[in-house]
Amino acid sequence: MGTQQGAGKWRQQELGLEAVETRLQALQEYLAVYRASFASSGSADSHARVRVLRRDVSRLRAWGWYLIACRDGARWLAVVQWLARVFSVLVVPQRHRSRRQQRTRTMRHLSSYSLVERAYAAQEDDIQGRLLTLRLAQRQNPNDLRAREIKRLERQVDEVVLLRLAGLPEARQLTVICHLLTWTMALRSCLGLRLPLADVADR
Amino acid sequence: MQAVTMLSPALDSLPRVFTLSDLKQLQPEESGGALDTVLRWLEAGVVKQVAPPRPVFYKVVLGEPLTDEDRCRALLRAFPSLVMVAGSALWRQGLSRQQDSVLECCVAETELSCHLPDVRLHWRPPAWWSAIRRAGGMAGDYHGVPMLNAELVLADASTFSGVWMPDRESVDWDRLSTARLSEASDYLRELRPR
């Protein structure tokens, strides 16, 4: 039972990390285009988008680092979690509309919680997209290999949904964790140390 | 169109191009239901997946082909790194008298299959976007899709093969700068496939 729970938790951590990496890759691609547009036009709109995206990338990368630490059982994790509990009372909760619902076309700041939640929701959509493609092919031309892959993806969707709905810390604690680790990463960068998830974020 | 409405009233309330997450927002109480709904629509042929397996779709309406705006919106939602290149960018900037028949775009993703009509995607290495930034090589956008400037279009077409370019005499050479063209070629030279 304990082993099953451990395996389930490990799988959830891996899925969470995969969601963060996939989203980071997409954000990096948006950032590359916006930076190129800003370099050519110098427009305030492009500049604002670049700034917002850079912030999003840093915070998501920080969350990815936290997930890696959870998976690897890093010793500093207890300190970060304690700090998150202590400082979370200072975080003012934000009332947010999603970017999709915002009226203006300019990108606005998302809370750390929304950012992470969106990464998990995007992963859920991506897996479901793959599932659709496979199910369509399966109905036209059934085979066992594809049936097994469909089952595996269906399980993954359930796990990501569970992770998004019940696997995240309280919003204010998550905000503190993201900010603490973002500052630590900035410090590491100043000291010339290698950053976590650098291979994903520096594509 | 009547058949489309009978399949589900939700399809009518969606824009011509939509994502799975748009549909989930319409049916928030049953996100698993959204998947089944789209599968039913795909089987009935009333929607198509823009670039499988990405969860972006467009509605198929007989006699109403997708407009340029729809195609651009669909591509932008499926490919974050999208940039318009080649003859498509030249035509839309008024630098060529020969219109493209296929929209030519570049993406960083390696999976290039796309079910949109009259669209051709080309892969470019991630360093390409950095080179474009250093060269200041964008010239505005077309329905949100960023376009390469004329000099970069020519440099890109000579560096990477396979993109459509208009005939030489159709290009308005007077509006191109030789100095900027040479600079653009320098930026892309190191990316030339060996």
Image (cartoon, coloured by chain):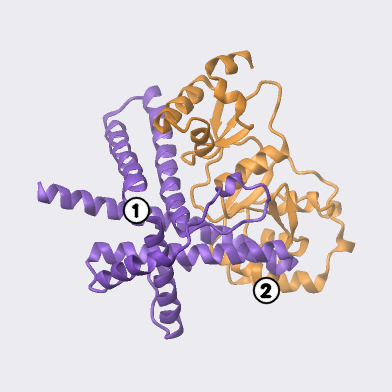
Chain colours: A purple, B orange
Residue furthest front in the image: A89
State the count of labels: 2
Residue at 49 percent across and 58 percent down: it is A111
Crowding near the residue tagged with mark 1, few <14, some 14–19, many ≥20 C-alpha atoms within 10 Å:
some
In this view of the protein, can residue B194 be seen by the observer? no
Residue at 66 percent across and 51 percent down: it is B163
Report whether A32 appears left or right of B31.
right
Crowding near the residue tagged with mark 2, few <14, some 14–19, many ≥20 C-alpha atoms within 10 Å:
some
Image depth: mark 1 or mark 2 in front: 1
For residue A59, above or below residue B17: below
Report whether B31 appears left or right of B160.
left
Where, by quadrant of the figure, is residue A153 drawn?
top left
Could you say where residue A152 lies in the image, as x and y percent from the top left? Answer: 28, 39
Q: Amino acid at mark 1?
A: Leu
Q: Are marks 1 and 2 on the same chain?
A: no
Residue furthest left in the image: A1
Could you say where residue B119 lies in the image, as x and y percent from the top left? Answer: 64, 41
In this view of the protein, can residue A132 be seen by the observer? yes
Residue at 53 percent across and 57 percent down: it is A110
Task: Determine the secondary structure under disc 2.
Answer: helix
Residue at 41 percent across and 38 percent down: it is A128
Q: Tell which of A63 and A98 is nearer to you.
A: A98
- The chain carrying label 1 is A
Instruction: Indicate which disc residue A145 carries.
Output: none
Disc 1 to disc 2, C-alpha distance: 48 Å
Residue at which label 1 appears: A168
Residue at which label 2 appears: B186
The quarter of the picture where the N terminus of chain B appears is top right
Could you say where residue A181 lies in the image, as x and y percent from the top left? Answer: 39, 71
- The chain carrying label 2 is B
